Image (cartoon, rainbow, N blue to C red):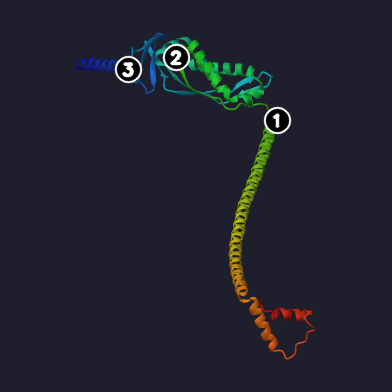
Amino acid sequence: MPDFTDHKLKCASAVVVVFLAIVTGIVMSSLHKIEEGNVGIYYKYGALMETTTGPGIHYMAPFVVDVKEILIRPQTTTIDPIMTITKDGIQVNFIDVQVISRVKEKQLVEMIRTYGDNFRGALIEDRVREELRKFCANHTIDDVYKEKFLEIAPHVQSGLIDQIERLGKGGLEVLNLVIPKPDIPADIADNYKQVKVQWTKQLAEIQQQKTETIKKETEKLKALADAERTKAVLEINIQQSILEREGNQNISRIENQIRKEKEESIADIAKYKATKEAEANQLLYTEQYVQLEMAKAMTQNTKVYFSGQNSELGAIMSKLFKTET
């Protein structure tokens, strides 16, 4: 009897342990954790529920509801190589095209219900391929590879946003789009390389011409500056020479004036002296004084010869000794 009781107790204990294990498993399976930057979406009997949960520990009905985590923080999507054909029939391949996008939580359930868990593939990757192919189909290889390459990314991004708004109800936000330079056929790439080489040479020649022009202009300006400086110095020298000549002329004029005034003064003195002497002589040499001086002179001579009164000497003598009546 005791053995039977012990057996029953052991069986009961085992049942309790199994029950507790089952309950623990059910409880553990009903609890789940959502990581930061994600939201949880739920499927009840395979049908997508409207409920979403944020980061943290959450509870769900076990065996009935399944949960999936969806990243809602910005995510970079690298698209597989995209082959396109240009307007002039050249194949162009775009490699490593990248799109940075972010999920809008309010539209998440609707996007997943419409496009499934891989909604980015339908709304981003496929739409980028479509926009790139349309752009290339309407442009030549020269436009795509060179002239309008910088217009490709803005054009595709604008079309992508419009498509997401129309098809995905704006559930994705496109933050950035990067489209690298496409791969083109090798022979065409070589042609572009040769054109680039020639263009670089032309730039070098143009720059050389500009350098020579600047050099010549500099030399010309320097020559003009030297000429202006020489002209200025010459003008100064001429002005100095003119001033010196004018100074010399003024000095000579002054000296001449002084000399003239001096000579005029001497002449005036001489004239005055002569005038005074003449006046004195006029007063001194009277007829009587002349006769007297003549008589004195004759008395000093021992011999006087004359031939009568009618001769010249006789006339003089007669005049000298003539007395007034």
Position of residue 35 relative to residue 207, above or below, is above
Cα distance in 3D space between marks 3 and 1: 63 Å
Whichever of callouts 3 and 2 sits on the residue coming sooner in the sequence is 3
Q: Amino acid at mark 1?
A: Asn
User: Given the current orientation, which residue lies at the most extreme front position?
Assistant: 325
Disc nearer the start of the sequence (1/2): 2
Q: Secondary structure at mark 2?
A: loop
Dot 3 and dot 2 residues touching (CB under 8 Å): no
Residue assigned mark 2: 171
Mark 2: few, some, or many residues within 10 Å (few <14, many ≥20)? many
Taking the image as shown, residue 188 lies to the left or right of residue 54, namely: right
Q: Nearer the viewer, mark 3 or mark 1?
A: 1
Rendered-image quadrant of the C terminus? bottom right
| Residue corresponding to mark 3 | 58
Name the residue carrying label 1. 191
In this orientation, which residue lies closer to the viewer: 64 or 123?
Answer: 123
Q: What's the mark number on residue 275?
A: none
Locate residue 58, reporting x and y percent: 32, 17
Q: Nearer the viewer, residue 272 or 240?
A: 272
Whole-angstrom CA distance, mark 3 to mark 2, is: 25 Å
Q: Is residue 171 visible?
A: yes
Q: Position of residue 193 (x, y in %)?
A: 67, 33
Q: Is residue 80 visible?
A: no
Q: Nearer the viewer, residue 145 or 325?
A: 325
